[in-house]
Image (cartoon, helix red, strand yellow):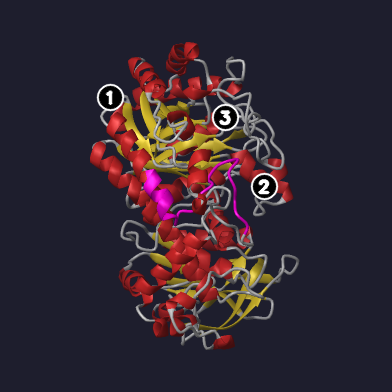
Amino acid sequence: MKLGVCYYPEHWPKSRWVEDAKHMQRIGIEYVRIGEFSWSTIEPTPGELHWEWLDESLDILHAHGLKVILGTPTATPPKWLVDRHPSMLAKDEQGRVRHFGSRRHYTFASLEYREECRRIVTLMAERFGQHPAVASWQTDNEYGCHNTILSYADADLAAFRLWLAEKYGTVAALNKAWGNVFWSMDYRSFDEIELPNLTVTEANPSHRLDFQRCCSDQVVAFNKLQVDILRAHSAGRDLVHNYMGFFTAFDHHKVGQDLDVASWDTYPLGFLDQEAIYTAEEKHDYMRVGHPDFGAFHHDLYRGCGKGRLWIMEQQPGPVNWAPHNPTPANGAVRLWTWEAFSHGAELVSYFRWRQAPFGQEQMHAGLLRPDAQEAEAAKEATLVASEVKKLAQSLGLDAEELMSLPSAGKVALMFDYDACWSLDIQPQSRAYRYLFWCYRVYEAMRELGLSVDIIPSDGSLDMYELLVLPAQAHITPQLQERLNAYKGVLLAGPRTGSKTETYQIPENLAPGPLASLLPLTVERVDALPEHTQPAVSGRWGAGKLKHWHEQIHTQLPCLLKDDGGNPVLMGEGRHYYLGSCVDNNVLKASLARLAEMAGLATDYLPKGVRVRERGNVIFVFNYGASSVFYAPENAQLVVGHKTIDAAGIAIWQKI
């Protein structure tokens, strides 16, 4: 439970650096991220390397007891490099070059740019890999930000053809896998294959899915190039990358296999305002605190991508500059978000940024300090959190390391699979349906029941969970099927599970495909519904509305919920259940409560805006609501906060 901050010494006079370091100490900051946008400062012209400013800033931070997360600067290649290698620039889906002038102006597939990255990262690692200030490295910054995973440049076409040849071996195998006999799309060689853009109408969905997979693998390779260099020259330091919210364009699990820690950049207010998932009522009710499950969902998702380790690299400290509207957080919100992250196992919460810059694209983005170097409200809340962490450790009788090692695993698992997300986004069938948003709403319902949830990959361990939920696992691999067969807990599979093969075709036995061995049913037809059409659903396990996706199912399994025509919606017996439709929060929560009960898990219908998370014998309670609320867990004593929790407030309890 450490605090950090993102700092840009190159933005400020050297006369400020020592005072900044002292001020960070006073607040309780222990980690400082620097360097991730500094390439043109390090190398203003080719081969002319200016390290002195970075040497000095590292020495100052180290002298004040601060640990540094040093970023590789590859997210912002300088203008001279772009001029030297113009083919490194990405192209959008319309074939237009994405030019220099902001950031992330490269395609991951460019071999020329990879060699430049190899050079600069090697130089940095050789110089700073053993510096006593450097505790960790961050590779690049926010892979894919500004929609930069899918690129349609010549380098991407060359990479795609090689990727396909390696995967399929022969073009005949590819033609069969893609179903290219449809619309006379057969190819004679891999060299004939183009990128799936600028087609007259929709490109082949199998073609699109493989291109998405290929682009994701380019990110994995790009990241691994840097990781290998850093491990060679800076052994023993944690390697990390900072992911983003509601972003699924590459497989974070695969990238995470080469790193030590997963981190992400959390901006609760910006995402509340810009994301279509949230209703107008939610945007109104949570305008200054963010949706109660936004941070939690991503904490659990990325902890699963980070081998159980989680950092927050950028925590919103005030208004941002990039959302449709940019309100000020409620008093206490920054403290609330920080403790929410700690409750899900975060080892570090780092605020973005130290001081609001008066220039550039982000000059309206707040920091812990205002542009005049005076403390903003978030600095006071960070100081409070630092003191509360010490209080919690003392109350529990733990030192810092023991506090960090409190178990963070939940009791329920939700499976999230990037490949399934791509599959169902490529052909959603209904514009109202999105895999990511459906997974989020399932997670929300479980959180509203007071359950502590882990989000796991499709190859994650299942043994420790009493309840496993597959919201929409489109493709069931033989390996996953084997593990599901052996799973001893309660299983719920959601709509669209098992609806596609690995090559994006409908299974011969129809959905749920191989899962029919556990759930004997057949999805005979689907009804993809617009937002305004929400038929009724009712039964022994609840009542509510169907939304977005409704499957017409033939089965002899007992039906626990039916639609208004008497057709099965939720069915199953023993340990295996299938939900054939997306449903509203009321019926979803009621059904999950019954399944949790069957799994031996206690549930609690929490007040609106209240959330609970357990770590070992510690219970964290959060109030995202607009008014105070009384909440006291049974058999627990209060450690931090009060039984009546203020709006945007927290309370921490210890089980007795």
Labelled pair 3, 1 in contact (Cβ < 8 Å): no
The label shown at residue 132 is 1
Q: Which comes sooner in the sequence, label 1 or label 2?
A: 1
Rendering coords of residue 285 (x, y %):
70, 41
- The answer to whether any part of residue 450 appears in the image is no
User: Magenta region: which residues?
Assistant: 96-117
The label shown at residue 317 is 3
The secondary element bearing badge 3 is classed as loop
Q: Nearer the viewer, residue 10 or 525?
A: 10
Q: Which residue is mark 2?
A: 274
- The answer to whether any part of residue 12 appears in the image is yes
Q: CA distance from mark 2 to mark 3?
A: 18 Å
The secondary element bearing badge 1 is classed as loop
Q: Image quarter for residue 289?
A: top right
Amino acid carrying mark 1 in the image: Pro
Residue lying furthest right in this view? 532
| 390 is higher (above) or lower (below) than 539 | above
Q: Which comes sooner in the sequence, label 2 or label 3?
A: 2
State the quadrant of the N terminus.
top left
